[in-house]
Image (cartoon, rainbow, N blue to C red):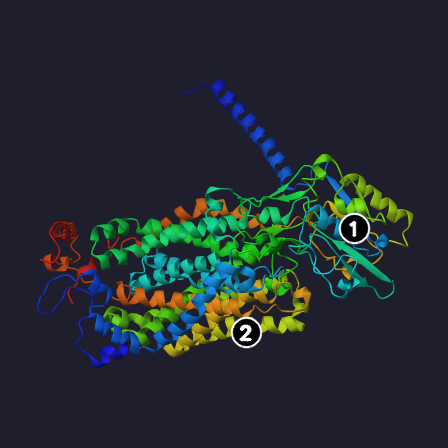
Amino acid sequence: MIDRRDFLKGCLACGVTAASIGVVGKNALAAGSFEGYPDAMGVLVDLTRCVGCRSCEAACNNEQKLPDPDLPFDDQSVFKEERRTTAKAYTVVNKYEVADKDTLFRKMQCNHCNEPACLTSCFVNAYTKTKEGAVIYNSKVCVGCRNCMIACPFNIPAYSYSSPTNPLIKKCIFCYETRLKNGRPPACVEICPQQVMTFGHRSDLIEMGHERIKNDPSKYVSKIYGEKEVGGTSWMYLSSVDFDKIGLDNHMQNEPIISNVKDFLGMVPMVLSIWPALFTGIHLLATKNKGEHGDHDHKEGDQQ
Amino acid sequence: MKQYLTRNPNTQLVNSLRTDNDKGRRWTLVEKLLLGLTPQQYLAQTFKNPLNWFFAIVFAVGIPVIIGRFIFGLEWATGGPQSNAWGLFLGFGLFGMVPLSSSGFQMGSAVEVFGRHDMEPLERLGILNGILGYFFAVVFLMVDLGQPWRLPYPMVVSWGPASVLFLVAWHVATYLSVQAAEMSTSFFEWMGWPAGRTVIKKMALGLAVAGIILSTLHQGALGALSSYAPGKIHPLWYSSSFQWLYFFVSSLPGGLCMVIVVSTIVIKTMAWRCDDNFKLNLDKLHISLAKGASMGLITYLTIRMIGVAHDNKWAYLATGWGAWWMFEIGFGVILSLFLLTTGVRKNNITLIRLGAWTTILGVVLNRLNVYLITFNWKHGEIEIPPLREFMITITIYCIYIATYRFILYRWPILFRWKTQYSEYAVLEATPAAIPAAIAAVAELEACPVGK
C-alpha cells in the first residue's frame, strides 16, 4: 500500500516529467521551421544593374573547371532563347524583353535555399547546407534517382547524363571548397564589372535590399525575391519589373518544400503502429464463429 | 499452347502425378519446365504461337537498345532531359505499374484478414500480379537510375530518412520480400517441398497485415513524392493535402481491375491451365471485384472533386488543361464507374471487363499526367520522350508479360497442385487428418524420389 504522502510525491514527479517533456516538445516544434543558420552568407543580385556581359558565366566556368562552352562567352547570340543551367554551366544569364521597360538580364544559379528541397528530397542524404550558407553535394553517395531535379523549385540541378559510368548532379556550390569556406565571395560575384551582386551576411543583405527599395521606390518593385520564397534563399534578387516577367515564379509558396510532405511523413509511424492491431482485430471479428479459423486450405488434397 | 492442345487433346499436363504407364511417379523438374511435353513437342507449340514471334521481334530490337543504354549512358537512351528528369521509365514503369499491383495486398487481405475464402481462386493470381508488378517496377527503376549499382545505398551506406523516396525504397524492398514469401507457397508446391509451404501458411495472417501496412504507406508515398513539385505539376493534378490519398485510393480499383483484366486474358488464352474451381467461379468473382472497384472509384471521384473545391481550382476547368482533366476523369473514372456498376446490376460480365480496362487505363493516364504530361506545364510544351526510351519501355513490358505467362503456365496459380499425400490421407475438415497428412508427406520426403 502506498500512503497519501508517497502518492502526492509521485504525482509531483509525474508532473515535472510531463512539464519537461512539454518543454522539449516545444523546442522540437521550433526546430521544425528552420530559418537558416544565423551567420549564413548570401548574395543580393540587383538585376537593374546587369548588362548581360556574361563575364560571370566565364568566371564560373574557370573556377569550377567546367568543359569549354559550345559558344564563346562573349557571344551574344545565346540570348535568343531562354537557357537553363546544365551539367556544363552552373550559371547562365538570360535576356528578357519587358514591354514598357527596356530589356532586363537575369543571372540564374543555385539559390542556396535555407531549407533546400533537393536536400530534403534526397534519400541518401547527398546534400548538405553548410553553416556558411552553401548547399553542397556529395557525389560519392548519389544513386542518380534525380528526385532533387524534380523537387528543386528553381529547376537548377543538372545531371551529366552523357557519362555511362559516373553520371552526377552538377550545380552551383557557392564556390564552397575554393572560396566560401575561407570567407571569400564566389567567382561570379568578384568578376562582375557592374557590381550587380553584393556578397555578405544574409541578414545584412535583406536590410540593404529594403533600404534600396525605400530610397528609390520608382526603380524597384517592392519585394526582395528570395527573402521569403520556399523558406528563404541565400541568393536574393531586386528587380525593376514583376518577377514573373523575368522567369522567376512570383507565386511560390513561402513555406519550405518539405512542409508539403510533413503531414504525410507524420502519418507513417501512426500507420505502422495502429494498422497491425486494427487489421488483426478486424480479422478476428470477420472470422469469428466461421469454424475455419485455422488452416482454411484443407481442400488442398482433393482428388480430381 | 492452346492450339497445340486443341490438336492433341490427350496431352498429359503437369499438375499432379503422372496418370499414364508409370502411374504415381512424380514429374521431374525438366518435365515440369516443359509442361509434360517432350522437347520436340514443346518447341513445336512454341513456334506455333504468334505471340512468341511478336516477342522475338521486340526482343531482337529492344534488348540491344537496353544494353546500349548501359554502354553509352542515359543520354543516348533518353536524350538527357534536364527539366523533366523523370521520363517513361518511372512515369509509366514505376508510377504506372505499382498502383496496378496493389492486387497483391487486396486479395491477400480479403482472404486472410477478412475471411473471404470464396476469393481463394483468385488469391494467388492477385499476389502474383502484385509481385511481378513491383519486381518490374524495380527493373524499370534500375534502367532509369544513373548509377543502378548503388541501389542498396539508401539501405546500407547513407540514410536520408526525411525523404519520401527513402520511405518508398524501404517499403518497396520490404514489401517485395513479403510478397515473395506469400508467393513461395505456389513455388514450394510446384517444386514438391510441402514443408516450406506449411511454414509460410502459418505466417499468412502476419504477411497479409504487413502487406496492408506497407501498401497504404508506399502507394500513398508515390503520390506524396509529387508534393515536392508544387509549381511544376498542373494545379488540377496537384494537391499538397490530398496527393497521397489520390494515389492510394486510385490504386485500389486499379489493382482489383488489373486482376479482372488478367484473369479475363487468362481464361481466353490459357483456359487449359485453369482448373474447374477457377473457371466456374470466375464470373461470380469478377462481380465481387467489380463491386469493390466501384466503391474505390466513387471514393476516388469524390476526393478528386473535393481537391478541386478545396483549393478553388474551378477556373482551370475552362482551359485546355481543364478539358484534358475532364477527359481523364470522364474516361478513367466516370465511364469506368458506369460500366462496372451497370455490369454488376445487370450481371453483365462483358461490361465489367470493359470497365476494368478503362479503369486501369485511367489510373495509368493519371500517373502519366502527373509525372510526364502536365509536369512543367508552365514551360508551355509537352516533352515527348525519344524513340529509344519507348523501345526500352516496350521491351521491358514484354519481358514482364513473358515472365508472367511463364509462371502462369507452370506454378499452381490458376489450378490446385494435386499432391501425392492426397493418396495417403483424405484431408477432409476433420482437423486430426491434417497432422496425419503432414506426417505422411514428411515420410514421403524421406524416401528417394521416383519410386
Q: Foreground: A251 or B118? A: A251
Chain on which label 2 sits:
B
**Residue B355 in sight here:** yes
Would residue A258 be seen by someone viewing this image from the given angle? no
Does residue B375 appear to the left or right of B46 in the view shown?
right
Q: Position of residue B203 (x, y in %)?
A: 30, 49
Q: Position of residue B259 (x, y in %)?
A: 38, 67
Circle 2: residue type: Gly
Quadrant of the snapshot with the C terminus of chain A? bottom left
In this rendered view, identify the residue nearer to me: B157 or A266.
B157
Structural distance between the alpha carbons of marks 1 and 2: 44 Å
Q: Quadrant of the N terminus of chain A?
A: top left
In this view, A39 is above or below A252: above
Q: Which residue is mark 2?
A: B330
Specify the subunit that label 1 lies on: A
Q: Describe residue B287's horizontal placement relative to residue A186 as left or right.
A: left
SS for callout 1: strand
Q: Dot 2, crowdedness within 10 Å: few (<14), some or many (≥20)?
A: some
Residue B161: give x, y in percent of width and height.
Answer: 53, 44
Q: Which residue is mark 1?
A: A237
Discs 1/2, front: 1
How would you rate the neighbour count of disc 1 (Cα within 10 Å): few for under 14, some for 14-19, many for 20 or more?
many
Q: Nearer the viewer, residue A152 or A67?
A: A67
In the picture, measured across the screen, residue A292 lies left or right of residue B433, that is: right
Tag 1: amino acid: Tyr
Q: How many marks?
A: 2
Where A201 sits versus A76, above or below?
above
